[in-house]
Image (cartoon, rainbow, N blue to C red):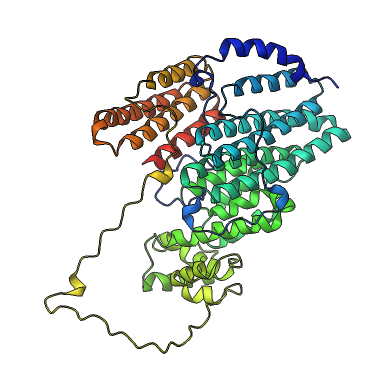
Amino acid sequence: MFSPKKVFSAFISLLLAVFSFLPQPLLAFQSQSKYFDYGPYYSSSQVLGFSFSNLENLPALQLPDSLNLPSATGVLPDSPFYPFEKAIEGTQLAFTFDPVKKAALRLDFASERLVEAKTMMDQGKAGSASRALDDYGKTLNGITDSLPSLAGRNDPPAQNLISKVEETVSAQTLVAAALSLASDPARAESWTGAGNAGRDALDKVAEVKNEPAIPESLSTGLQSLKEQGFLSEEEANKIYSLKNRGQVREELNKLTASGFFPPSEIIKLDDAVGRYYPEAQNQQIANSQIMELRSYQTLPQPGSEVMTELQKWQQDPTVPPSNDIKPYLWYNRAQDLAKEVNLSNFSPDQQSKLVELYPRPVIENPTYSPPPSPVPSSAPTVSPSPVPANSDPASSPAPSPTPPAAKPYLKDAEGPLPGQPTYFIKQLGEGFNLAFTFDPADRARFRMEAAERRLVEAEALSSDPKKSAFYETALKNYQSAVTDASKSLEQIKNPEASRRVAQALEASVTADW
């Protein structure tokens, strides 16, 4: 069998002799662009949230053993020779002329990128993992671009490949969700981006297979949200008028980011994931519903008069709710959701905390497991310490809450830091990459990633008083890089690419602050 990798190896050997002495940053691919399933209203204070990390205290997704990613071998993204490995893959694609075989080859490469990313994450090399995940998303884009022509062939090999893409990407999307849930926030963002790339591919598969834009389970949820007042008749009609799942997802993301649509319902758009892995998707939905219930506790709670009006309106929800109760429509949904959410995978401690928030509905939940009754103790009762006469417990100020640490939300610093002799090489490599990046969307992403690197450098320098000047310079460079990234958005002509980069920039800056 003809193997372009072997044919190309001699040429690569010559190149290695020339380039092996170049500094690694010059050979590095651009870091991952963190795509998020948020619309342009990300900054809304009512966002329910859709990117979960290990800080959320949610049960891990139970995946089949077949979905466990192995450790990657061979040339990895942290190697200076990795670009040559990618060049060999590009040559393989160039010499593969059959569209079905080319798409299958891309699917294999996408799977390799995901395995490489997991290996790099396990080794603590988040930057290298980001490059692999960026390539993963781009490779999936290449596959989805070819799907319409493959579907038009209407022959068994093409149809079988479309089904294979659907099954493989469904598994990869689920794996990305599981890894996100098991990671700290900074790494969770990277896995969320990979999952979003998979969802975009699955939306395209559904489109070429002529599947309905709105799956049946999501349609049922939309009707419930109409009855609960979350969706107006006009909003529901607009959603049902959309032609494909990509459009539906974009519209629902906007509603979610503005606080008017629960993320647990958007998961139902991943119809293929539900068909291949129903139990795991149900776990995803339950986790999202718990996060939704927690988020409602941060909103203003209804008083007795409002609750009375909510009960009256619930008896006839066909009448539009009054302005007085509109801000509290979530209350009825929260009570119903607390009764229905599947708590089977949640620990007793997690269930007990939910009981504290929604006592009556959770106790009525058939999947709720009450904690065991405490065993009476024969130990003597310890009297509480007396309160000093001059103290006033009621007036004692509560201790200030500990501010959240920034470290979980930032990746580890890679390479030299400002003030170190070799830092200029890192800057030279970034300038080299930017100079040879011509696509406006890629340039905007590169500037955004450079901004995040500056913030990571500032965090690494913040604990050393002797480097305060470098710390302040890094912060200024971060602000400058964010400004440059924002200006780069104006040069993007493709509306879809502009939307994605804008969402990633907005989400990244929001997470940083």
Say if 364 sits above or below 215 in the image.
below
Q: Residue at x 39, y 20 (%)?
A: 422
Q: Residue extending furthest left?
A: 390
Q: Residue at x 47, y 42 (%)?
A: 186
Left or right of 369 on screen, residue 276: right
Q: Is residue 260 visible from the viewing direction of this image?
A: no
**Nearer to the camera, 350 or 275:** 350
In the image, residue 299 lies at what x, y percent? 39, 60
Q: Residue at x 50, y 18 (%)?
A: 26
Say if 112 sits above or below 192 in the image.
above
In the image, residue 394 lies at what x, y percent? 21, 73
**Nearer to the camera, 61 or 513:** 61
Q: Residue extending furthest right?
A: 156
Say if 299 sits above or below 148 in the image.
below
In the image, residue 397 lies at what x, y percent? 21, 65
Which quadrant of the rendered structure holds the C terminus?
top left
Quadrant of the image occupied by residue 485: top left
